[in-house]
Image (cartoon, helix red, strand yellow):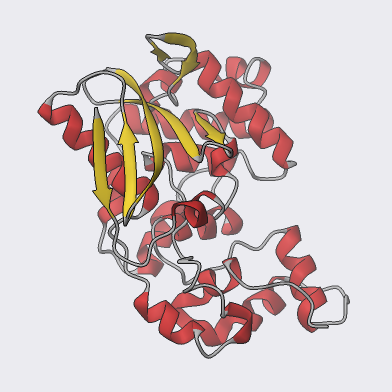
Amino acid sequence: MQLMLSAHPPFSFISVINSHGWPQLAPCTWDKEAGTLAYVTRLDSGRVIELRLTEAPGGVQATVDDGLSEAERGEATRQVTWMFGLDMDFSAFYAAARREPKLAQVEARAQGRVLRSATLFEDTVKTITTVNTAWSGTIRMVKALVTLFGSPLPVDPVRRAFPTAAQIAATDEATLRSQARLGFRAPFVLALAQKIAAGDFDLEALKTSDLPTPELRKRLLAIKGVGDYAVANLLMLLGRYDAIPVDSWALKMVSQEWHGNQPVGRAEVEAAFEPWGEWRGLAYWFWDWTPVA
């Protein structure tokens, strides 16, 4: 079965893939030569399927080996639409970017969309695993969570979907520390999963929330393990670009760009992109950091 999904123009499949490191994390498998992102997902029915996602004229083609019911087809469509931000409009950002040589490429490359997971729970857990670790550590932790707790793909049980909150909530902190090797992140991931599984926190509702960004930020910061860096990253994924996910890389690049390689802090990073207002996060994310000759 194939689903043909249109995007608000302009759209570039490869620009979304290259927007950050999520294609390297389970349950994604990125085949660069074929231009295919395979994503194993668990539907609300409990059925586990693989979505093979490729670029199509004006959008994305999703291929599934087996037939889907009408409800499953609708859910798969919603998942892919969310993951690739197919309904997002960046015309206002492009209009502002035309005045800045360091952002001259964004419209031509149809940049702006940042690849997301099917659920905000998955994105939140993945973001927590990026805190205070090398990228290789994030890859390892996410793979362990998927392998240990995710539902298997029937045709290839080695491959699994990202675990649901209920699946993680059913384990314990010791297992998350010793087997998933989450370290200090273990109690944070477990507490979030348990709160969602118990029905005490509707995290997914924040995907479509019309809360002002400061209030949305407050809700996300209430999640244990989500600090300033993580909340900025999650807001980016939610289409709120008011904040910058300041990490060591951001400090390094801002130092090189504007401060002659002298040490800088969060304040200098935020000041550099303050003029971009509601688009400051995107301006930072897609800035051309190549030194001018």
Determine whether, in the image, residue 89 is placed left or right of residue 35: left
- Residue placed furthest toward the left: 70
187 above or below 177? below
Q: Nearer the viewer, residue 36 or 264?
A: 36
Can you give x and y, in whole percent of width and height, for residue 143 in the image?
59, 25
273 above or below 251? below
Determine whether, in the image, residue 63 is placed left or right of residue 17: left
Can you give x and y, in whole percent of width and height, for residue 137 in the image?
71, 34
Determine whether, in the image, residue 80 is placed left or right of residue 38: left
Determine whether, in the image, residue 143 is placed left or right of residue 268: left
Residue 203 visible at all: no
- Residue 211 placement: quadrant: bottom left
Q: Residue visible at 36% across and 22% down? A: 166
Residue 103 visible at all: yes
Can you give x and y, in whole percent of width and height, for residue 272 in the image?
65, 82
Count of numbered marks: 0
Q: Residue visible at 62% across and 85% down? A: 101
Q: Nearer the viewer, residue 211 or 238?
A: 238
39 above or below 93? above
Q: Nearer the viewer, residue 63 or 201?
A: 63
Can you give x and y, in whole percent of width and height, for residue 12 in the image?
44, 58
25 above or below 289? above
Q: Residue visible at 56% across and 34% down? A: 31
- Residue 181 placement: quadrant: top right
Q: Residue visible at 40% across and 14% down? A: 153
- Residue placed furthest toward the bottom: 99
Check the picture and name the quadrant holding the N terminus: top left
Check the picture and name the quadrant holding the C terminus: bottom right
